[in-house]
Every structure is written in C-alpha cells, then in structure tokens.
Amino acid sequence: MKEKKEVQIDSSWQDTYGDMVTLLLCFFVMMVAASSVDQAKYEQIQAGMQEGVGKADVQRPIEMMMVELADDIQSLDASDKVSLGSDTQGVVLEFGGDTFFDTGSAEIKPQAIPILKKVAATLQSDRYLKFNFSIEGHTSNKTFSNSKYASNWELSAARAASVANFLQDRGIAHSRIKIVGFADNVPKLPNLDPFNEPIPQNQLKNQRVVIHIEPRIY
C-alpha cells in the first residue's frame, strides 16, 4: 500500500487577508472619529486618503480659506478688530461690536468698511461657492432701548442683518446667508463678577458679530 503524500497548504494568502482587514479597521476607525462632523478634520482625513491613493490635486477649501482670511486680516493690520478661528462646522470670523458699530446703532462704521470689503472679496470667490454663512449678532447684558430698537434682541439681529446685507451687496447670494440675533444669551465672557457687579471690559467683548462659514456639501 502506497504511503499518502503530505499535502502542503499554502497559507500565504493569510498575510494579504490580514493586511486588508487591518486597512478596513483603520478606515472605519477614521469614519467613527469623523462622525461628529468636524468639517476641518474631515477635510484633512479626506485629503489624506486621496493623497494615499495617488491623487495629486487634492482640494482643501477650509484650509485655503483660513490662509486667505488670515492674510486679509494681517494686510489690514486688523488682528485687534477681527479674530479668525474654526469650529466643528467650518471657519469662524468674529468682529468686535465696538469697532463696527456705535452704541445703540446697527449702522456699520466707516472705518470698518475696508475690513468687510477685503473679507467679502475673498468669500465671494467662485472657489467658495459651496459655503453658507450664518451671521450672529451678540450684545452685552446692558439694558438697552431707543426709538429704533426696543431691546438687545432687535439690536443684535439688526447688526447681523447689516453685515449680511453688506456681503450680499458684494456678490454673495442671499440664499447662502442666514442671520440670528442672540442678544446677551451667548456671552464670550461673564458680564458680571461674583458680587453681581458689571465687568465693563467683558461687556465690551461680548458685543460682537460672528460669521460661521460652513460647507453646504462635503
């Protein structure tokens, strides 16, 4: 009776299979990490994956916008009047209320016009057509009322509307813009100290207009 030959099993496929499973695991981990919809991080992840498969021309619109706006602010020496940052949805521009508006007014000051023109010229570019703009008006907790605006609600909304109208006049479609008046409900800093006394410097900083610039489709 002939002796049976020992069958050799080729297990080299296991290495490839293991690599594939590891890559899939990494992919899903990144997807979970991006599930909070942090647009800036999502852009970095997306660009990294595209570069990994050999795509040379990778678009990073949020990063590009941040660079251009930073250059605008620096060229106008306006870093003490405008702050630039980002959140989970996109880019955030903040304008100091005392720089852009007189007390109790929603009319943009003449010295603020060059800043808004420069920013609007960047934002209305075709490369940013897929971005929307949410413009927020904020006030301090100082009680306010005059013949034109009955309260901080009306004043904060009117200031946001003034900036929105300016952007629209510079070529940004009104369908891409929304405004919100927060009055004193979302302060950056406490308006009052522990003894319930006003903090004037904080109240001044709480008067602001904030533009959230968010991609529509990503």
Image (cartoon, rainbow, N blue to C red):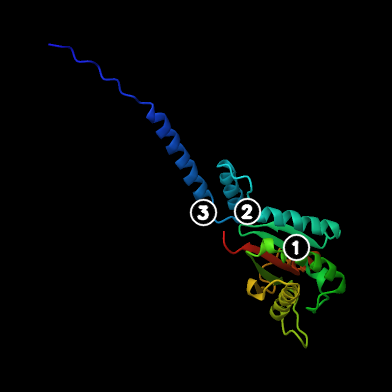
Q: At 38% from the left edge and 30% from the top edge, which residue is drawn? A: 14
Mark 1 and mark 3: Cα distance apart in space: 30 Å
Q: Is residue 81 visible?
A: yes
Q: At 30% from the left edge and 23% from the top edge, which residue is drawn? A: 9
Q: Earlier in the sequence, mark 1 or mark 3?
A: 3
Instruction: Find residue 181 and name its label.
Output: none
Instruction: Find residue 40 and name its label.
Output: 2
> Where residue 152 appears, x then y in whole percent?
72, 78
> Where residue 10 appears, x then y in whole percent?
34, 24
Q: Which residue lies under the disc numbered 3?
A: 35
Mark 1 or mark 3, which is nearer to you?
1
Q: Residues within 10 Å of mark 1 (few under 14, many from 20)?
A: some
Callout 1 amino acid: Thr
Helix, strand or loop status at disc 2: helix
In terms of depth relative to the viewer, which is nearer, 16 or 164?
Answer: 16
Mark 1 and mark 2: Cα distance apart in space: 19 Å
Helix, strand or loop status at disc 3: loop
Mark 3 and mark 2: Cα distance apart in space: 12 Å
Q: At 70% from the left edge and 81% from the top edge, which residue is drawn? A: 154
- Count of numbered circles on the image: 3
Q: Is residue 5 left or right of residue 163?
A: left
Instruction: Find residue 122 and name its label.
Output: 1
Q: Is residue 200 visible?
A: no
Image quadrant for the N terminus?
top left
Callout 2 amino acid: Ala
